[in-house]
Amino acid sequence: MKRLIVLLGLLVGLVLMGLADETIVIRYAHWNALPPDPYNYVKAFEEKYPNIKVEFIQIPEAEYSQKLRTMALAGNAPDVLCLWEADLADFARAGWIIPLDEYVKQSKELSLDDFIPAVKKLMELQGHLYGLPWCFATEIMYYNKDLFDKAGVPYPNENWTWKDFEEAAKKLIVIKDGKVVQYGCDALSFQGLWYSLIGTFGDKIVDEQGRFAIGEGARKFLNWWYDLTNKYKVVASPQISTSGVVSADLFMAGKAAMAFNGSWMTSVYKDITDFSWDVAPIPKGVRQYSTLHTGFFAINAKSKVKDAAWKFIEFCMSEEGQKLINTAYSNPSARLSILKKGYYKVEGPKGPRNWSAIEKTAEFAEWGYTLLPPGLTFDLVKDFNAAILGQISVDDVIKRAIEKAKDILGEDRVVVQ
Amino acid sequence: MGKRKNVIAYLFVSPWIIGFILFTGGPILAVILLSFCKWDLIAPPRWVGLENYIKMFRSESEFWMVLKFTLFYTLLSVIVSVGWALFTALLLNQKVKGVRVFSFFYFVPAVVPMIALTFAFQLIFNKELGVVNYLLTLIRIRNTPNWLMDPNYVTWLVAVLNIYTFYTGQMMLIFDSALKEVPKELYEAAEIDGAGPLTRFFRITLPTISPILLFNLVTATINSLSASFTLIYPLTGGGPGKVTQAISLDIYYNAFKTFRLGYASAEAVILFCISAVVSLLMFILSKKWVYYEV
């Protein structure tokens, strides 16, 4: 009997020891590869929490959305997902992710008031806080300082309106032998810019109820942009872009004095050595508007290690984690206190210097079109381009856009502005 | 003993049969079923009957534009790619020095990744910085075209650029080996009878390689219909507007960018039917011009 008790005691001891040593494994998916040392935030987390191991799953960007959906459908989605804006709403609606409100409330590290305004707005739209932005990017204006100096045109600033832009663009073109050899502004290459610029003309793009809302603003913008391209020839003709990447960048080639693009292009343009350049917010129309881009850290509702998953998200959103992420990807933090510290600023020899343009844009920018399926918004851009090329009338483009949106989103999720 | 042999034979072919059921037959069946459903990859598929097909064939549907381009592209790209493959294969069968070097150069574009190739073409045909327009300015043409954004040029261009795809290179190799099999004595006899190069080509070469020509025509047609995605998606993305939106591209956009899996499946079923009908027609018509040596 005694032997049996000793044996049982030993067994219980072993089990307890095993439990004490147990390492929790969380699965985490992202479209980007993990950055190398010393910016590997996953490694930094594991060092800080040795009892939690992160199994990283990289899913190529082109199939990210559908892969996560099929994983969720099959019930084997990762514990921590970094979801795109349009997917966040769908995943929340399907009950595949959990609200993070309580976690944030109890967190000593995070406070909702410390986030850029768009985060709170999205929370109001969706009823709960389903995700935290891992960092953010926005859409801004780029300008060639040397070409501005040469033409004697003052640099753009945060108070610029579209009138200032048009006047400057007209002064910045150079014509030789009847052919434009230098444009005031490059054509819009990244698809999202169409929505940012239309937004400044008054359309809500996505309204308070999450409905797609375009109309009069789009009509005014497209007609004006058509004139700038074809009548005044100060904006270059549209060219093919694959997923927002163009093979020939007129701004980078020094053949366009201004360009609109994502803030992520600062990490590409920083290698420019031929001319000085800088950034400014998108000019004002009837209002200031730009689009925000991000991925949201979210927790799988079926995860068995939700607390450990939250610990990982909390670490990534802490100053320690954000510093690593911001520096590795040259993208600013959505936390205002960390954004001010500017860990994302990677300057080149010729620019940029005016980083406040990105910070100011973050104050008014919205998630906008990114909350809608990319198949709809990117497809409409092909028609916008066709309108600028005079292949379809602007009115037809707007009509088709609204019909298509109704077809894809449903009648109740579309508003004509 | 006979039964045992049969079982063994079936065991040997079973990996292929299982693979076919799981990875080809099963998905085909699933696509047919899904084409009668509405599914956004979130809520479970919902049966909607013929709704997807009705939507597709409405008079105002964009599908007509997509179908028109797909048929135009298929016809032109088959003519261009098969014609080019046969032409280069004929060149490789000429008795000239350095024919192996030519063979290398003809085949190289076929092995260059399509993404790299399409980016190069985007640069070459760029309105402002492209080499084609630069050459045009040298001959005093001021209003140079915006090649990839002008519907008048881009549809022709994407079809012609097919000569750089992998399957054109592959067809060239198949034609090359077929040409080497044409009996030399036929040419010698024709030459004695006074037949010129054109007569020799149409009366001897073409009839002899006609089975291979049929094979290449069928594979090129199926490739143009279904695999056009790899060329068009990175080159034009289907634009401007919808002028280069082939069905394969439309299926991708509807399935994975707007998550309308049901509608995309219905398009896939239609594409399958078109491929089957066109291939069948080719086989029927081939009886009149394909020469099988007995």
Image: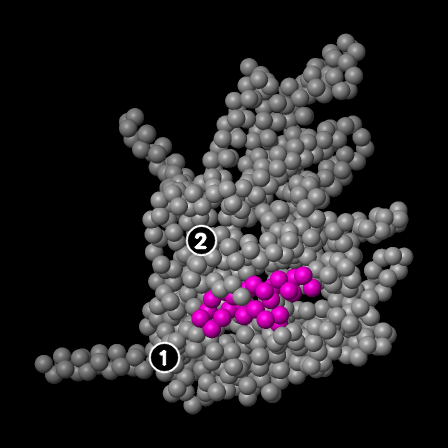
Q: In the rendered image, which quarter is residue B289 located in?
A: top right
Residue A67 vs B287, above or below: the answer is below
Asked whether residue A408 is in view, the answer is yes
Residue B287 vs B131, above or below: the answer is above
x, y percent for residue B72: 61, 37
Q: Answer with left or right where residue B92 lies relative to residue A316.
A: right
Q: Dots 1 and 2: beta carbons under 8 Å?
A: no
Q: Which residue is mark 1?
A: A307
Residue A210 vs B145, above or below: the answer is below
User: What residue do we see at 74% from left, 41% from top?
Assistant: B105
Q: Which residue is mark 2?
A: B260
Q: Answer with left or right where residue A140 lies relative to residue A119.
A: right
Asked whether residue B31 is in view, the answer is no
Q: Answer with left or right where residue A98 lies relative to residue B256.
A: left
Q: Chain of mark 1?
A: A
User: What residue do we see at 55% from left, 26% from top?
Assistant: B282
Magenta segment includes A217: yes
x, y percent for residue A108: 43, 90
The answer to which of A209 and A145 lies nearer the viewer is A209
Amino acid beneath label 2: Arg
Measured in 3D between alpha carbons, the distance from the residue under mark 1 to the one under mark 2, in whole angstroms, is 35 Å
The outermost residue toward the bottom is A108
Residue A55 vs A338, above or below: the answer is above
x, y percent for residue B150: 70, 48
Q: Magenta part of the protein: which range?
A: A200-224
The answer to which of B130 and A404 lies nearer the viewer is A404
The outermost residue toward the left is A1
Q: Quadrant of the N terminus of chain A?
A: bottom left
